[in-house]
Image: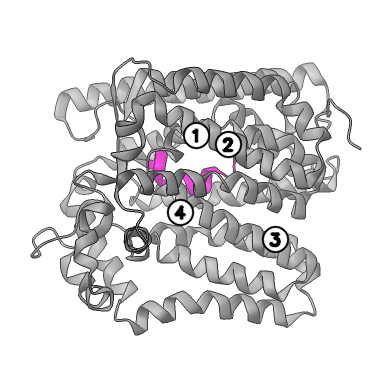
Amino acid sequence: MPSAEPHAPRSGDPSRALRRDLYAAAAAALLVTAAVLIGRHVQDTDHTLRVDWPPLLASWGPHLGPGTPAALLVAAVTVAYGPSLAARLPWRALLPTAWGTSLAWTFSLALIDGWQRGIAGRLTTRHEYLQVIDRFHDVPGTLRDFTHHILLHSPDNWPAHVAGHPPAATLIFVLLDRIGLRGGGWAGVWCITVGATACVAVLVAVRSLAGEHLARRAAPFLVLAPAAVWMGTSADAYFAAVAAWAVALLALAVTRASPVAAGASGLLFGLTCYLSYGLTLLAPIAAAVLWLGRRGVRGRPVLLVALCAGAAVVPAVFTLAGFDWWEAYRLLVTRYRQGAGGVRPYAYWVWANPACTVLITGLATAGGLLRSGAGLLGRRSADRDSVRLALLVAAALLSLLVADLSGMSKAETERIWLPFAMWLLPSCAFLPRPRAWLTAQAVLALLLNHLLRTGW
């Protein structure tokens, strides 16, 4: 049984390594500060950022709410007992415990804004999916006609989030409505409940690829992530969970030689592409998993066949139903440039987007990423599992870099990049003194949710 107080992986002189961690956290904090101050100046001067509290889509509004006591309690308990429980609990008990705690953390943060604004009203605004439920009474007909309503000047053009995503993103809410779970309350509960499973999927993947020790060390940081502020406010929480399980099942497939897991992973990868166009950038993460599990794949072509067959199912269904993914994406690029995306300056957002990532992953992740990089550069001295985890984290960074440089993610990346940011958090497993870093993570999330009123 693991010890109650797990030790961080070795990283040279402890005091020098700790100073480097703090330098990384300070640099991340300076990046955020610069993004806030420069963004404030740009927005006040020419109003091109199209956000009220750059770099976030939020407005200043200090407040308390019914979720405040619960959020403080969850944070305190997780900081005090999270690391030791993550080390001691049987693995099968750790996973539901992590999901339940993540669920409590996300719900309590959302309820700081109250039930209506924090949960029930999020997906009912004029930009959101629930605005068009009635237009999907004939699903096949709507899919055939979907691309005709993407552009701003088209008749009955879709709201921003519907136009900006393939139709599978909206269809889940249509399905909830059809089975009687109508309205923003049920939609919000669905996104939070499913979204909270993302931390479980990441743990499963990390354990499969880099060992149980590092997965256990990462668990409290996945649970108490500042990303929960946005996991409770948008459908991107649901997208993040689907993406995370696609990767987790792939990790299980290559480490256990399971064609069933490979097929299920492919099915979810196919679905992600019809939830969000940007989730095609999961490719570097999937490639890293295949590379790390290459020994399990070698000589077993059935795994790749099952993966590809599964991945073809959702695209085939939507294509046969009349939805043209490539045409829709082409029109979306035009729609993006017609709206705020055509106004927001690339020169600001190309470096302010990473500042948003700091806010959703926390200062602890900055230190963890530095240690990940050091582990890759000094592979001869690092243990095998640490190098494997660092490679997985590096793949997620590559996905974010491509998304950033593409210019199709100018602003709002605090929610858009949730599916990728989840894979940066395991780097916190490399940090010593987890309670101190967890405290910093919790304080950041609580300050964000109490001082700002986030969008969506």
Residue type at tag 1: Thr
In the picture as drawn, the residue positioned furthest to the bottom comes out as 320
Nearer the observer, disc 4 or disc 3? 4
Secondary-structure class at tag 1 = helix
Residue bearing the label numbered 4: 239
Residue type at tag 4: Phe
In the figure, 150 relative to 90: above or below?
A: below
**Residue in the picture at 88% in, 35% down:** 2
Mark 1 or mark 4: whose residue is earlier in sequence: 1
User: Whole-Å distance between the Cαs marked 1 and 4?
Assistant: 16 Å
Task: Return the residue nearer the eye: 398 or 389.
Answer: 389
Mark 4 or mark 2: whose residue is earlier in sequence: 2
Residue bearing the label numbered 2: 102
Residue type at tag 3: Ala
Residue type at tag 2: Ser
Q: For residue 54, what is the image quadrant?
A: top left
Residue bearing the label numbered 1: 106
> From where the camera sits, is residue 121 visible?
yes
**Do residues under tags 1 and 2 come within 8 Å of each other at their CB atoms?**
yes
Mark 1 or mark 3: whose residue is earlier in sequence: 1
